[in-house]
Image: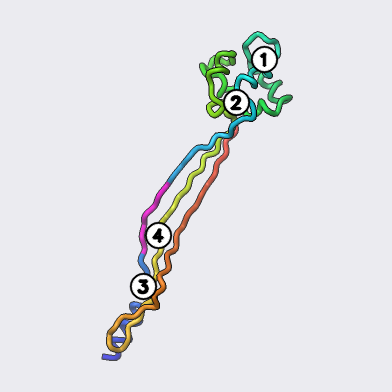
Amino acid sequence: MKRLALLASAIIIGTTGVASAETVTERVVYTTPEISPLQAFDRMDLDNNWVVDTIEYDWAYDHYPAVRGYSFSGLDVNGNGKITRSEAKKVSPQAASAQKTVVKTVVKDPVVVERQVYVDPNMNVHHDGAVHVKTNTSTTRTTTTY
């Protein structure tokens, strides 16, 4: 009988349970530029013809740091290769932002649940009362500038 109790004790000590629940969330964070799209347009429109082409955009990008918050493709709503004043009025700063960050969070919960137990010679199960739960959370951030 004692051998059976010791054998049972050795088997139960260190019992762990493993769960496989996983939650994945992803969100996109846009960097809001310092100035409005219309203010950026006014700085980019060098010849005051109410149209900005890629040459004007490149010059303004090099000389006005506040303009760097906007991408040409974000301001060119219709995709014709030119930014008009009406396009600059319509677009939101977030939509025309030159930088976005994708934040992906993976939570595996709980990964391991542990409880230390032992069996006495009378076949009674005892534990120390401590339950250990370990979780695994990982977050990745990817920043894209265009």
Question: What is the C-alpha distance between the residues marked 4 and 3?
Answer: 15 Å
Question: What is the C-alpha distance between the residues marked 1 and 4?
Answer: 56 Å
Question: What is the C-alpha distance between the residues marked 1 and 3?
Answer: 71 Å
Mark 1 = which residue? Answer: 45
Indicate left or right for 33 with 123 as reference: right
Question: What is the C-alpha distance between the residues marked 3 and 2?
Answer: 56 Å
Indicate left or right for 29 with 125 as reference: right
Amino acid carrying label 1: it is Asp
Magenta region, residue range: 18-24
Q: Residues within 10 Å of mark 1 (few under 14, many from 20)?
A: some
Mark 4 = which residue? Answer: 110
Mark 3 = which residue? Answer: 15
Q: Which of 114 and 53 is in front in this view?
A: 114
Occupied quadrant, residue 135: bottom left
Q: Which of 33 and 103 is in front in this view?
A: 33
Amino acid carrying label 2: it is Ser
Q: How crowded is mark 4: few (under 14 residues within 10 Å), some or many (20 or more)?
A: some
Q: Are marks 4 and 3 in contact (CB under 8 Å)?
A: no
Mark 2 = which residue? Answer: 71
- The residue that appears at 68% across and 19% down in the rendered structure is 43
Secondary structure category for the residue under label 3: loop
Secondary structure category for the residue under label 4: strand
Mark closer to the chain start, 1 or 4: 1
- The residue that appears at 46% across and 42% down in the rendered structure is 26
Amino acid carrying label 3: it is Thr
Q: How crowded is mark 3: few (under 14 residues within 10 Å), some or many (20 or more)?
A: few
**In the image, residue 5 lies at what x, y percent?**
29, 86
